[in-house]
Amino acid sequence: MAERRSIFIGKKPLHAYVRAVVMAMEEGERELQLVARGATIGRAVDVAEICRRRNGIIAQGLPETVNIGEIQCSSEVFTQEGQKDRTVSVLTIELDGIGEVPSEEE
């Protein structure tokens, strides 16, 4: 199985990440994963739900069905020189696009 394309969730507005998912799926990549660390985990869940429900104008460009696949929860330890090690939670959400992407002419 090929490696899923990863979209890393940061502090940009939600629509920026939804648009990234739409663009990837328009390019033919129907198996993606959202990766979020720490405080951005809630934003990743929101992006996944917007895509699954196809909410909003931007999300209308997604395939007919977007399924949320496996969700993985883990943690990473960050080491910075001169500072105490920090453990950060990581959430990975798999998205699978099924069906045709609507054409822009509709």
Image: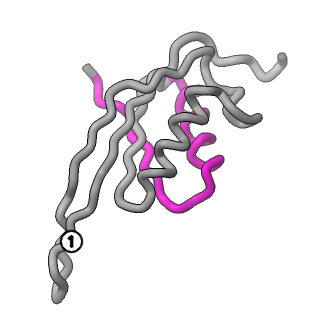
The answer to whether 15 is drawn above or below residue 52 in the figure is below
User: What is the x, y in percent for residue 4?
Assistant: 35, 31
User: What is the x, y in percent for residue 66?
Assistant: 53, 22
The amino acid beneath tag 1 is: Arg
| Pointer 1 local density, CA inside 10 Å: few below 14, some 14–19, many at least 20 | few
The answer to whether 76 is drawn above or below residue 71 in the figure is below
- Is residue 87 rendered to the left or right of residue 35? left
Q: Secondary structure at mark 1?
A: strand
Task: Please tell me which residue is depicted at 63% across the width and 25% down the height of the picture.
Answer: 62
Tell me the quarter of the picture where residue 58 sits. Answer: top right
Task: Please tell me which residue is depicted at 47% across the width and 25% down the height of the picture.
Answer: 29
Which residue bears the numbered disc 1? 86
User: In this view, which residue lies farthest toward the bottom?
Assistant: 82
Tell me the quarter of the picture where residue 86 sits. Answer: bottom left
User: What is the x, y in percent for residue 74?
Assistant: 22, 48
Magenta extent: 2-28
- Is residue 35 rendered to the left or right of residue 83? right
Q: How many marks?
A: 1
Task: Please tell me which residue is depicted at 61% across the width and 12% down the height of the picture.
Answer: 100
Tell me the quarter of the picture where residue 13 sits. Answer: bottom right
Q: Which quarter of the image is occupied by the C terminus?
A: top right
User: What is the x, y in percent for residue 105?
Assistant: 83, 19
Instruction: Check residue 26 for magenta coloring.
Output: yes
Q: Which quarter of the image is occupied by the N terminus?
A: top left
Task: Please tell me which residue is depicted at 21% across the width and 65% down the height of the picture.
Answer: 87
